[in-house]
């Protein structure tokens, strides 16, 4: 009887000690969203403060490249998004990364590029890249919504508009 009680207590202690802790599945807090449009416009949205940065690299184009030995000029401007806009941008970017949009069009010469990065801190990033998709800002309802928010806060900056009219398109 004494051994049975000891055996029961031992099994009980091992069972309690090995019990799995349940973790609630809370969403990761993002720190930065980076949106790269057409390889030349980089929009960095910080979740911690209200200032976002837009870097525009003036690299020339296929038809009018920069002269040799010319440095690429980069302009930086500030953009301001509300907390609600940041939340919406996060949702749209996450959706475009986790549920990629397919298109039946293919543009050549790297026309229609969009790179999306969600940085959750030092150890994890989600990245999605769209290339040769013609006019990325009308690719889907999600990209239209993303473009509309960016355009509302960032004026007079090229964000991939009207690429389809000037590119070579093949199906």
Image (cartoon, rainbow, N blue to C red):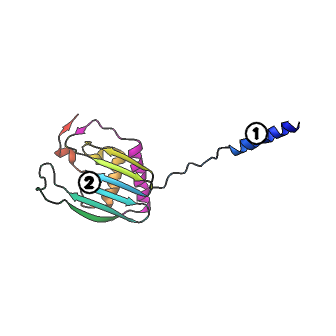
Indicate the position of residue 55 as horizontal and vertical percent values: 28, 60
Find residue 11 and name its label.
Answer: 1
Which residue range is magenta in the image? 80-107
Residue 119, placed above or below residue 12: below
Residue at the top extreme, as displayed: 171
Find residue 31 and name its label.
Answer: none
Neighbours of disc 2 within 10 Å: few (<14), some (14-19), many (20+): many
- Image quadrant of residue 98? top left
Question: Which of pointers 1 and 2 indicates the residue nearer the eye?
Answer: 1
Neighbours of disc 1 within 10 Å: few (<14), some (14-19), many (20+): few
Indicate the position of residue 5 as horizontal and vertical percent values: 84, 39
Q: Quadrant of the N terminus?
A: top right
Please name the residue shown 13% across and 52% down the image: 65
Residue 54, placed above or below residue 93: below
**Looking at this view, is 17 or 90 the one in front?**
17
Q: Which residue is mark 2?
A: 159
Report the Cα–Cα distance between label 1 and label 2. Answer: 64 Å
């Amino acid at each position: 009887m004494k051994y049975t009680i000891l055996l029961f207590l031992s099994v009980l202690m091992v069972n309690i000690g090995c019990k799995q802790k349940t973790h609630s599945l809370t969403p990761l807090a993002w720190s930065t969203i980076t949106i790269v449009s057409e390889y030349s416009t980089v929009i960095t949205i910080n979740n911690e403060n209200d200032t976002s940065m837009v870097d525009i690299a003036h690299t020339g184009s296929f038809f009018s490249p920069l002269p040799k030995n010319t440095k690429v000029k980069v302009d930086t401007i500030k953009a301001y998004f509300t907390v609600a806009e940041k939340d919406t941008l996060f949702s749209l970017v996450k959706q475009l990364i986790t549920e990629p949009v397919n298109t039946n069009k293919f543009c050549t010469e790297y026309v229609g590029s969009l790179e999306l990065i969600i940085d959750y801190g030092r150890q994890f990033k989600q990245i999605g890249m769209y290339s040769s998709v013609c006019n990325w800002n009308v690719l889907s309802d999600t990209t239209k919504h993303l473009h509309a928010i960016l355009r509302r806060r960032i004026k007079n900056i090229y964000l991939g508009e009207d690429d389809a009219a000037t590119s070579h398109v093949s199906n």
